[in-house]
Image: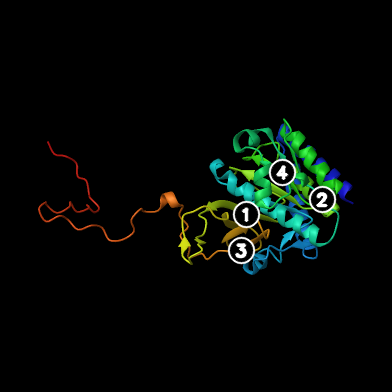
Amino acid sequence: MAQSAVTRERLFALRETIAKLEGKPAPALAAAQSEALADKRLAAKNDSGPRFPLGIPALDEAIDGGLPLDGITEARTDLLREAGAGSGFVLALAAMLQRQVEESHSAPLPILWIADMVSTMEAGVPYAVGLRDFGLKPDQFFYASPRKLEDALWLAESAVESGVFPATVLEIRGNPKPFGLTESRRLSLRAKASKRPLFLLRQAGEEEASSAYFRFLAAPAPAQARPLPDGTMLGGSIGNPVFHLTLEKSRNPAPLSFLLEWNPHDRRFFAVSQSANPRLPDERATHSGTPLSAPSNRPDRKKEMGALLAFARTS
């Protein structure tokens, strides 16, 4: 069934290419309508599919009980300098899946991370020591970086279809043309047939139509204050990573934002109050309070000017 669906998707892609060459948009519109209908059917079938809850009641409710274990979940970042936030969020999901496998007393299964060459050159590669400190097992983590994006897509399809990996991560840079809605649909069908999840990590990418059930916008957030032995709280130090997540694609009428702290020891998320200061430490004022009064032996400070209306200078 899945193979015939993939064959239909390839036929749609070929018809769309021929339509563009001949200047006839009718086949392309038919293919787009068929893909939209298939997406609706997949969404309806996913209601009864396996789910992976994140342990945050408000977030799990927003994603219909959890992330799909037989589909695509997308995470993206706005800027390349925020690549650590996107990678960290996806790695946390992979660590939670590894913990779930361990708790089910099953044989340990590795995580596969696939990154295209462009993304690797700019965002870096996973570090074994950092993976261990983050809650993952380096000996159960495989990494591949094909030279071409087409090879990375082929490897992702093969990995998901094999069913060997409890989670497969595909990291790409931006919105490349070789990876469009047709390729996304093909990956979604592979995941549906093998009942294995695929995490699509789009570094410095824009919102784009895809077959992902959910899409998150990941951004860094300041770490929370840590308790000291004397009972006081130490703020602005190195603590557990905190992610500012925006649920962009879901059944909710508007995007939802969450602050989640990742605990690598317990390998689980904890909700952070939205009232916490969302600005990074270097963006906060050094002294928060009323400004100093003007000295008595000097003129008062110059008052700030309001809105001005400029007139043409007369001769």
Q: Which of the two residues, 228 or 36, is positioned nearer the viewer here? A: 228
**What kind of element bears circle 2?**
loop
Q: In the image, what residue type sits under mark 4?
A: Leu
- Give the residue type that dot 1 points to: Phe
Mark number, residue 170: 4
- Where is residue 300 drawn, in percent x and y? 14, 54
Question: Which of disc 4 and disc 3 is earlier in sequence?
Answer: 4
Q: Residues within 10 Å of mark 3 (few under 14, many from 20)?
A: some
Distance from the alpha carbon under mark 4 to that under mark 1 = 15 Å
Local packing at callout 1 (Cα closer than 10 Å; few below 14, some 14-19, many 20+) is many
Residue 109, label in figure: 2
For the residues carrying marks 1 and 2, which lies nearer the camera in this image?
2
As measured in the structure, the alpha-carbon distance from the residue carrying label 3 to the one carrying label 2 is: 25 Å
Residue occupied by mark 3? 270
Mark 2 or mark 4: which is in front?
Answer: 2
- Location of residue 45 in the rendering, given as x and y in whole percent from the top left corner: 80, 61
Q: Quadrant of residue 104?
A: bottom right
SS at circle 4: strand
- The image's colouring method is rainbow
Percent across and percent down for residue 10 are 81, 41
**Sequence-earlier tag: 2 or 4:** 2
Please indicate, yes or no, whether residue 15 appears anywhere in the rendered image: no
Q: Is residue 278 above or below residue 180?
A: below
- Residue pointed to by mark 1: 216
At x 59%, y 49%, the residue is: 85
Asked whether the residues under the numbered discs 1 and 2 touch, taking CB atoms below 8 Å apart as contact, a structural biologist would say no
Q: Is residue 194 left or right of residue 171?
A: right
Please report whichever mark, 4 or 1, sits nearer to the chain's N-terminal start.
Answer: 4
Mark sitting earlier along the chain (1/3) = 1
